[in-house]
Image: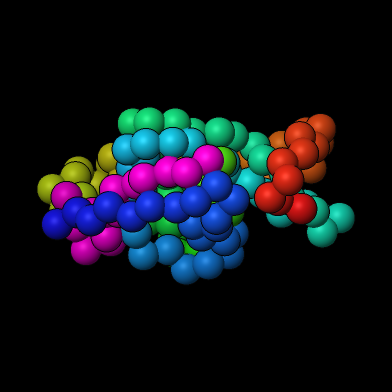
Amino acid sequence: MFVTKNFVKGETIFKEGDLGDRTFHIIKGEVLICKNRRDGGMVAIGKLGVGEIFGEMYLFDPQAGGRRSATAIAACDAEVEVIFEETLTKLMADMPPQLGSIMEALCRRLRKLSGDYAMVVPVKKYSFIN
């Protein structure tokens, strides 16, 4: 079962380091994916729009302990479909083990690259992130 949720511009959907328990599908609006920087600030490393999915990596990287790899913030008023972990787990039950291993490797790689990128990307200022 899926539910929808609305977020207003600047609202945090989840924070980097939070435990994940759901994934999101954007129905309306845009979402910024942000990383914490060593200097205490935060930088947007991507902007996602209608039809895109985010918040799924916690499922595929057991080394991260189910933790979120980034912060998600509504870039404007947004509507998302919430897909709970129980539903995703059922969908993944028929997935061949080799595919699961590939997903784990991709998520670990993406987690590392996005962290590295956040340290060197010029900071684009949004009034609602520090």
**What's the magenta region?**
76-91
Q: Quadrant of residue 98?
A: top left
Identify the residue shown where x is 43% and y is 57%.
58
Residue drawn at point x = 36 percent, y = 45 percent: 79
- Give the colouring mode of the picture: rainbow
Magenta span has 56? no
Residue 96 percent across, percent down from the top left: 19, 43
Is residue 82 one of those drawn in magenta? yes
82 in relation to 26, above or below: below
- In this rendering, would 108 be left or right of 83? right
Q: Identify the image quadrant of the N terminus.
A: bottom left
- Front residue of 101/27: it is 27
Q: Residue at x 49, y 51 (%)?
A: 8
> Can you give x and y, in whole percent of width and height, for residue 72 in the image?
54, 50
Outermost residue to the right: 39
- Residue 127: x and y, percent? 73, 45
Position of residue 17 in the picture relative to residue 93 (left or right): right
Q: In which quarter of the image is residue 43?
A: top right
Residue that appears at 38% across and 52% down: 6
On the rendered structure, is 121 left or right of 1? right
Residue in front for this viewpoint, 52 or 90: 52
Q: In this view, does 57 lie to the left or right of 129?
A: left
Q: Could you say where residue 22 lies in the image, as x and y percent from the top left? A: 34, 59
Q: Can residue 104 be seen in this view?
A: no
Say how many tags the image has.
0
Please indicate, yes or no, whether residue 84 appears anywhere in the rendered image.
Answer: yes
